[in-house]
C-alpha cells in the first residue's frame, strides 16, 4: 500500500487528500430559480432523471460521460434544491450484470461521512458538560503519544499529529488478505501508537482516522453505551433516519436492499496502464467487496445509509438541528484552511469539527472499500447534493463521487448565471 491514505474511510493518496476528505466543489451556486420540465431517460444502462429542472438535461450528459469513462458499475446523484429545482440521476443496477436498477432507498457504505456523526455526538457531550474541547485526550485514554497536549478539539479538526493507523503497511497487508477480520479499536490504536506522530499537536494538519477511533472510545466511556447505540439514539432516531446504522464490529453483511460495492486489484490507487485499458474495454471487471468487514473504520467510517437518508443528515448537519445554536456556530467557525502543506487547498478548502467546506458548500466526503460518497449542502441556496458511487476508485485512481459532485455544482452555478 505504500503511502495510500484513508481520507474518508478508504485509502487514497496524500496528493488528493483534500479532494477525498472533502466534497471538493470548485464553484458555488448563485441565487436564481429554475423551471421544471418532463422526466427524461438516459441511454446509460438504467438511468433516470426525475422531476427534471432546466439544468438537468445538460448535467445528465456530463454525469453520464464520467460514469462511462470511470467504469463505475452504478452511481446515484441527488440534487435537492428550492433554488434550482430537484433532480435525481440513477445509473446502473444494484449488482454488476444484474437487472435491478439502483434507487435512492438502497443501502450503501458511506465511509467518512461517519465522522460528521461522531463529531456531532462529541459536541452534544460537550453541551452536556461531560467533556470540553480543551480537555487533553490523556484524561480519557491512556498511552496516547503527547496525550497531555492533544486536545479534543485537535482530534475533531485533524490537528492532533497522531499517526494514521491505515498508513501502516503491515496493517494494510492484513486488511487486504483477512477481509472478514474483526478489528477492535484498541488494536487500531496500538498500530497507530507504534509510530511517531507526524508533528507536534496543533502545529499542522493531517487527516487521520486514529483521531475518530479515539473519539468513539471516549463517547462510549463517558456514556456507558456502545457507539452503535449512541448513533441510533442521538442521531438516527430523532431525525427519522430509519435506514441508517453504525453496524456492530462483527457485522459485515449489508441491510436489504443494498448496492453491491466493487474495487479493482488490491485497493490500488491506479491500475497499470494495460489493465486500465482492459477495464475500460470491459475485459477486466472489478471485484465484489460488498460484505468485507469494515470494522477497521468503526466511528471513523463504518456507517451504512441510503441516499435519501443522507439528504436528511446533510440538512441536519448544516442547520445544527441536533445541537444548540451556540454549539453549531462554534462548529461552523471551526472550519479553517488546512495549511501550507496543502497548497492546492489554499483559499478553496477548510476543515473543522468533523465538517468541511468548499466554496459555499458544507459537508464531508466518504471512501471505504467498494464505495465512494460525496455529501454537501449550500444553506444560502437551500441546495443539497448527494453522490454515491459503488467503486472504491476508478481504474486510473479517480475518486468518482467527488468528480460527479463537482460537475453538479458547476452546472448549478452555470445555470444561475445564464438564467
Image: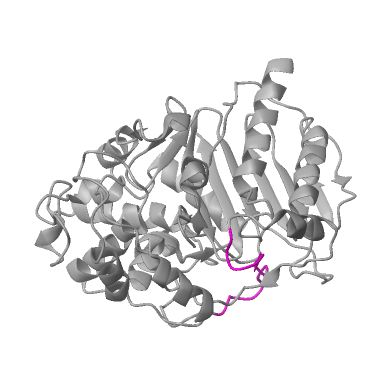
Q: Is residue 21 visible?
A: yes
Quarter holding residue 53: top right
Q: Is residue 22 visible?
A: no
Question: Where does residue 24 sit, x and y in percent of width and height?
Answer: 54, 38
Residue 91 magenta: no
Question: Where does residue 320 sit, x and y in percent of width and height?
Answer: 37, 43
Q: Residue at x 22, y 38 (%)?
A: 203
Is 15 placed left or right of 257 in the picture?
Answer: left
Is 66 placed left or right of 324 in the picture?
Answer: right
In the picture shown, does residue 370 fall above or below 206?
Answer: below
The magenta segment: 253-268
Is 287 placed left or right of 185 in the picture?
Answer: right
Residue 259 magenta: yes
Towards the viewer: 74 or 273 = 273
Q: Residue furthest top?
A: 418
In the picture shown, does residue 371 fall above or below 179?
Answer: above
Q: Residue at x 34, y 32 (%)?
A: 339
Q: Quadrant of the C terminus?
A: top right
Q: How many marks?
A: 0
Question: What main secondary structure does the magenta stretch of the protein show?
Answer: loop
Is 146 placed left or right of 245 in the picture?
Answer: left
Colouring mode (rainbow / by chain / secondary structure / one colour): one colour
Towards the viewer: 230 or 403 = 403
Question: Where does residue 271 sit, x and y in percent of width and height?
Answer: 67, 58
Q: Residue at x 36, y 58 (%)?
A: 209
Q: Residue at x 49, y 61 (%)?
A: 240
Quarter holding residue 194: bottom left
Amino acid at each position: 500500500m505504500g503511502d495510500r491514505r484513508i481520507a474518508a474511510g478508504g485509502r487514497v493518496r496524500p496528493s488528493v487528500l483534500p479532494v477525498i476528505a472533502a466534497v471538493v466543489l470548485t464553484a458555488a451556486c448563485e441565487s436564481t430559480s429554475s423551471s421544471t420540465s418532463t422526466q427524461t431517460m438516459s441511454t446509460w444502462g438504467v438511468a433516470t432523471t426525475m422531476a427534471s429542472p432546466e439544468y438537468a438535461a445538460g448535467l445528465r450528459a456530463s454525469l453520464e460521460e464520467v460514469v462511462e469513462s470511470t467504469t463505475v458499475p452504478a452511481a446515484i446523484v441527488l440534487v435537492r434544491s428550492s433554488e434550482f429545482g430537484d433532480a435525481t440521476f440513477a445509473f446502473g443496477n444494484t449488482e454488476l450484470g444484474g437487472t435491478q436498477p439502483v434507487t435512492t432507498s438502497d443501502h450503501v457504505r458511506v465511509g467518512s461521512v461517519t465522522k460528521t456523526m461522531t463529531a456531532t455526538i462529541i459536541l452534544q457531550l460537550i453541551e452536556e458538560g461531560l467533556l470540553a474541547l480543551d480537555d487533553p485526550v490523556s484524561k480519557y485514554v491512556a498511552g496516547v503519544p503527547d496525550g497531555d497536549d492533544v486536545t479534543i478539539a485537535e482530534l475533531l479538526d485533524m490537528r492532533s499529529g497522531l499517526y494514521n493507523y491505515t498508513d501502516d503497511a503491515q496493517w494494510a497487508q492484513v486488511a487486504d488478505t483477512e477481509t472478514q477480520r474483526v478489528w477492535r479499536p484498541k488494536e487500531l490504536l496500538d498500530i497507530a501508537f507504534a509510530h511517531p506522530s507526524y508533528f507536534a499537536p496543533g502545529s499542522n494538519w493531517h487527516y487521520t482516522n486514529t483521531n475518530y477511533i479515539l473519539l468513539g472510545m471516549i463517547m462510549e466511556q463517558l456514556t456507558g453505551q456502545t457507539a452503535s447505540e449512541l448513533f441510533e439514539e442521538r442521531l438516527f432516531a430523532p431525525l427519522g433516519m430509519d435506514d441508517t446504522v453504525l453496524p456492530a464490529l462483527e457485522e459485515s453483511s449489508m441491510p436489504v436492499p443494498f448496492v453491491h460495492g466493487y474495487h479493482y486489484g488490491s485497493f490500488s490507487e491506479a491500475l497499470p496502464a494495460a489493465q486500465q485499458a482492459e477495464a475500460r474495454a470491459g475485459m477486466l471487471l472489478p471485484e465484489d467487496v460488498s460484505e468485507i468487514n469494515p470494522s477497521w473504520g468503526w466511528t471513523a467510517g463504518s456507517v451504512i445509509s441510503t441516499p435519501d437518508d443522507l439528504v436528511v443528515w446533510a440538512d441536519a448537519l448544516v442547520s445544527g438541528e441536533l445541537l444548540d445554536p451556540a454549539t453549531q456556530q462554534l462548529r461552523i467557525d471551526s472550519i479553517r484552511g488546512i495549511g501550507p502543506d496543502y497548497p492546492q487547498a489554499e483559499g478553496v478548502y477548510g476543515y473543522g469539527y468533523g465538517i468541511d467546506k468548499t466554496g459555499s458548500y458544507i459537508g464531508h466526503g466518504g471512501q471505504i472499500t467498494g464505495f465512494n460518497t460525496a455529501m454537501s449542502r449550500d444553506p444560502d441556496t437551500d441546495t443539497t447534493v448527494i453522490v454515491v458511487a459503488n467503486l472504491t476508485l476508478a481504474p486510473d485512481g479517480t475518486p468518482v463521487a467527488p468528480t460527479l459532485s463537482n460537475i453538479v455544482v458547476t452546472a448549478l452555478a452555470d445555470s444561475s448565471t445564464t438564467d
